[in-house]
């Protein structure tokens, strides 16, 4: 991201694990920590996937086999960074962007910085949904922290 977006939703957390585990927990184990209620189907049996490559899909699959796309991976730089277009709340024709940075921190912990932006991509829809995105991250990130911390 080149120009800082003053309306971006920014969250910073610290998890008690190293960079590699923090990155893998977010990307490979997302199904274990992402709250099932924060999905398109809302089905508690939903499975969540991130394909670990640029152009990879982020999606959910219901127990009945229906798939719903959540986004597309834009940057894949383990264990430091990945970014994706995010469709939840806006749709694939008007994606927002999420950047997740993993930074080594004190005592072997990792600082995780999440930046979610979108006015340049979805215009007025960003303004209408910005507080909803902020609230959603507040609900989702604690589950990730629990999964990372021993």
Image (cartoon, grey):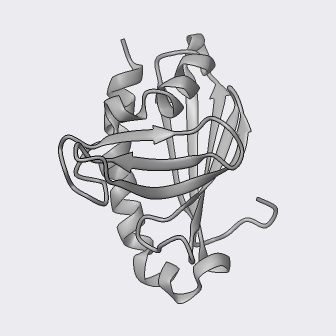
- In x, y percent, where is residue 39? 31, 55
State which quadrant residue 146 falls in: top left
Of 118 and 40, which appears nearest the observer?
A: 40
Residue extending farthest to the front is 65
Which residue lies most toward the bottom here? 124
Residue 27 is situated, as x and y percent measured from the top left of the image, at 53, 33
- Relative to 50, does residue 110 appear above or below in the rendering? above
Q: Relative to residue 72, is residue 31 drawn left or right? A: left
Q: Quadrant of residue 54?
A: top right
**Residue at point 33% right, 60% down?**
135
Instruction: Pick the quarter of the image with the N terminus.
Output: bottom right
- 79 lies left or right of 98: right
Observer-nearest residue: 68 or 116? 68
The total number of labels drawn is 0
Q: Residue at x 48, y 84 (%)?
A: 125
The correct choice, above or below, for 115 with respect to 13 in the image is below
Apparent side of residue 41 relative to residue 2 in the rendered image (left or right) = left
Estimate the x, y position of residue 91 in percent, counting from the top left. 48, 72
For this orientation, the residue located farthest to the right is 2
Q: Position of residue 34 (x, y in %)?
A: 34, 40
- Which corner quadrant holds the C terminus? top left
Side (left or right) of 104 relative to 60: right
């Amino acid at each position: 991201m080149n120009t800082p977006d003053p309306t971006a939703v920014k969250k910073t957390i610290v998890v008690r694990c190293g960079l590699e585990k923090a990155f893998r927990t977010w990307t490979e184990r997302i199904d274990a920590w992402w709250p099932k209620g924060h999905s398109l189907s809302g089905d508690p049996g939903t499975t969540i996937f991130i394909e670990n490559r640029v152009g990879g899909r982020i999606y959910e699959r219901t127990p009945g086999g229906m798939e719903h796309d959540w986004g597309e991976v834009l940057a894949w730089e383990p264990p430091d960074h990945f970014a994706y277009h995010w469709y939840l709340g806006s749709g694939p024709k008007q994606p927002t962007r999420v950047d997740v940075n993993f930074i080594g921190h004190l005592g072997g912990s990792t600082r995780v910085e999440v930046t979610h932006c979108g006015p340049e991509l979805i215009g007025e829809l960003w303004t209408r949904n910005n507080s909803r995105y902020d609230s959603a991250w507040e609900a989702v990130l604690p589950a990730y922290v629990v999964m990372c911390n021993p």
